[in-house]
Image (spheres, helix red, strand yellow):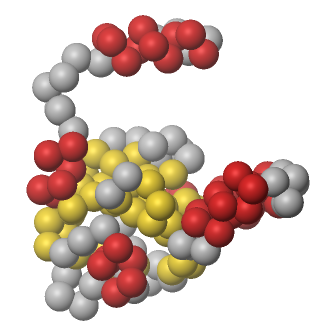
């Protein structure tokens, strides 16, 4: 599981240093699969979590228009990236350009995945000081109790 929020940066070669607390999970799992179709950030899955998600999507009715559109957008945006021995991953230009990643970034855990945001965009989209109570109230309807 991925949890926590970390400030990192994309270096001049386009590499991201994976937060050390995420590395053990990622390195045991192999590579990272990044997708670009969420908000204005990259979403990263460990290889096994991604394969499980692909299996789930493959079981959906493949001729349903919504499933077709979702698969085209979501799966087609996926890029499997190798993590080097130093815990860095080279993000292809296409991925970085899609969400304007360069320089300072915010990497945040999202349970079975993590997000990589341009720091300025993250600050504009997130209200860090916002209370979690209204959101907790809404998700409690799904049976989540905090």
Toward the bottom, the furthest residue is 13
| Residue closest to the eye, 72 or 79 | 72
Eyeballing the image, is 82 above or below 99? Answer: below
Expressed as whole percent of the image width and height from the top left, the position of residue 30 reads: 61, 73
Q: Quadrant of residue 53?
A: bottom right
Eyeballing the image, is 105 above or below 101? Answer: above
Q: Quadrant of residue 36?
A: bottom left
- Horizontal side of 103 relative to 78 (left or right) equals left
| Residue closest to the eye, 124 or 136 | 124
| Residue closest to the eye, 112 or 29 | 112
Expressed as whole percent of the image width and height from the top left, the position of residue 125 reads: 21, 43
Eyeballing the image, is 21 above or below 128? Answer: below
Q: How many marks?
A: 0
Q: Quadrant of residue 110?
A: top left
Q: Residue at x 56, y 72 (%)?
A: 78
Q: Residue at x 28, y 45 (%)?
A: 5
Toward the front, the furthest residue is 65
Expressed as whole percent of the image width and height from the top left, the position of residue 97 reads: 30, 79
Q: Residue at x 50, y 17 (%)?
A: 139
- Horizontal side of 60 relative to 75 (left or right) equals right
Residue 85 seen by the camera: no
- Horizontal side of 123 relative to 20 (left or right) equals left
Q: Residue at x 14, y 46 (%)?
A: 123
- Horizontal side of 70 relative to 110 (left or right) equals right
Residue 98 seen by the camera: yes
């Amino acid at each position: 599981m991925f949890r926590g929020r970390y400030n990192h940066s994309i270096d001049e070669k386009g590499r991201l240093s994976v937060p050390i607390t995420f590395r053990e999970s990622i390195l045991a799992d192999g590579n990272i699969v990044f997708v670009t179709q969420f908000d204005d950030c990259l979403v990263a899955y460990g290889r096994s979590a991604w394969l499980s998600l692909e299996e789930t999507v493959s079981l959906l009715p493949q001729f349903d228009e919504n499933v077709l559109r979702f698969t085209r957008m979501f799966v087609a945006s996926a890029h499997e990236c190798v993590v080097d021995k130093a815990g860095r991953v080279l993000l292809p230009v296409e991925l970085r350009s899609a969400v304007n990643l360069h320089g300072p970034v915010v990497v945040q855990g999202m349970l079975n995945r993590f997000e990589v945001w341009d720091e300025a965009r993250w600050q504009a989209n997130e209200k860090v000081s916002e209370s979690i109570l209204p959101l907790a109230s809404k998700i409690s309807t799904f049976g989540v109790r905090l």
